[in-house]
Amino acid sequence: MLKKRIIFTLLYDGGSFILSRNFRLQRVGSLDWLKRNYVFSRITLAIDELIVLDVSKGERNRGAFAECLAALTEECFIPIAAGGGVRSAEDAGRLFASGADKIVVNTALFTLPEEVRKIVSLYGGQAVIASLDAKRSGEVYEIRTENGERLVDGSLAESVRMALSLGVGEIYLYSIDRDGTGQGLDMEMLDFLPPDMPVPLILTGGVGKSPHFLEGLRDSRVDAVATANLFNFVCDGLCRAREELLAEGVDLPCWDGETTESLRNLFKGAN
Amino acid sequence: MGGRRVFVVDYGMGNMRSVLNAFRYLGCEAEATDDPLVVASAPCLVLPGVGSFRKAMETIRSKHLDRAILESVLERGTCLLGICLGMQLLFDFGTEDGGAEGLGLLGGVVERFPAEKMNGLKIPHVGFDSVDFSRREGLFEEMPEDAVFYFVHSYRASPIESGDCSEGICVYGEPFLAAVQRENICGAQFHPEKSQSNGLLLLRNFLRMSERC
């Protein structure tokens, strides 16, 4: 049986990591700051996957983002997905070369579907995550791209089917309304998905405390829950949330952080 | 300074960086190489890889790495760890992409998950899944109960069920070979470099084994 997953999403903006609240971004700090204040390796011990997204507005410095990604992956022994502004197989290739196992595509799904197909054919569908930003509008959900600014034609289900037709291996479904509120996941959104989703679903937006993870992961339609909120999970916050979820019987992998720590540099000086 | 030297065979297929990172975390001096002379005399070898079996074997043969690996493993007794596609290449034959002969260090054929036995399970098998170990020694020393590892694959080898092999078995539709050790020949269908404490323990065990080789 495949396990469920807890995912942490790091948002990167021009050299700094940030928090998002309904796409209004707040600067938090640099990679050094992150490592100093959040003992980054401790965070990675409490999660099953890391997603790093470049949400810089305007001109992106793709080389700097790739370097930052490579530095992040040095002591991170879980799958890593990266994205933000991926428009071509070349963009994807740069992120794979910097340590990404998967690529996240968003706007390109709608504007450059052939490029997404190309990435899928080069690296396999399992290495491509389609990120969809959904916003409640009356009785339905609409999909938006370009940091929430552009409205996409059609329903949430239609957008999901379109992404699946390109061969993507996972759907990352994000609630614009709940983002940064810490008020819990938008579980109603799940009723608007196509039934019998053929690929795993990652649900995100609104996780503020561990019961929110529980609500998401208990739903059979949800394979993983992601949070991007650094402040809600300072220090041991994520570790404690994970322990509570395991105690509640959620089928997550068991990781042993002490073992990981004890193995550091074990063979240093050995010949 | 310094540390245990590990050579990771680089034939242009797969995430070299994360494999090197994991060995460096353990304090090793890990290097990528595609030089058959280095491979033939390496103290310890890792064969990673993601992609097609046939393409991988073609590349390995064209770079004369196949003979170097066999010389190192069979004549010098070097410990070898194949990861993901790298484990599949240890077998006699792989049916992927029209089929090709492998390195032949382990007997058996690597085939696609049989769709008719999957009961609606998706192929590829992607994610964290549990592995049961037949013996907790050598490569599998101190492996926890219900140890979970990260998998991404559509092809797999079947359990060998031979007395001279230690095996890790995962059930996905039916049991398949998730990890194996026969003397100095080791393989992991999963990614130890993506499996937190469990994966690092397996790499530690591999390095300890290679001390004794």
Image (spheres, grey):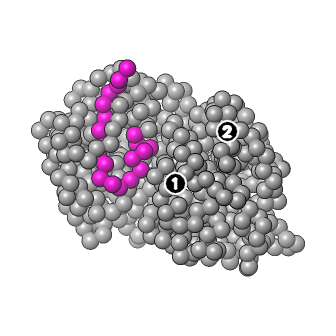
Q: Is residue B99 above or below residue B26?
A: below
Residue drawn where x is 33% and y is 38% of the image: B31
Q: Which residue is mark 1?
A: A95
Q: Quadrant of residue B37?
A: top left
Residue at image point 23% right, 55% down: B60
Residue beneath label 2, please?
A: A30
| Residue numbers of the magenta segment | B1-20
In the rendered view, would you say A170 is above or below B22? below
Query: Looking at the picture, which amino acid does disc 1 mark?
Result: Leu
| x and y, in percent, of residue A8 in the image | 65, 46
Q: Residue A43: name its quadrant.
A: top right
- Horizontal side of residue A225 vs A129, given as left or right: right
Residue that appears at 55% across and 51% down: A63
- Residue B19 within the segment the image draws in magenta: yes
Q: Position of residue B150 (x, y in %)?
A: 47, 48
Q: Viewer-proximal residue, A17 or B171?
A: A17
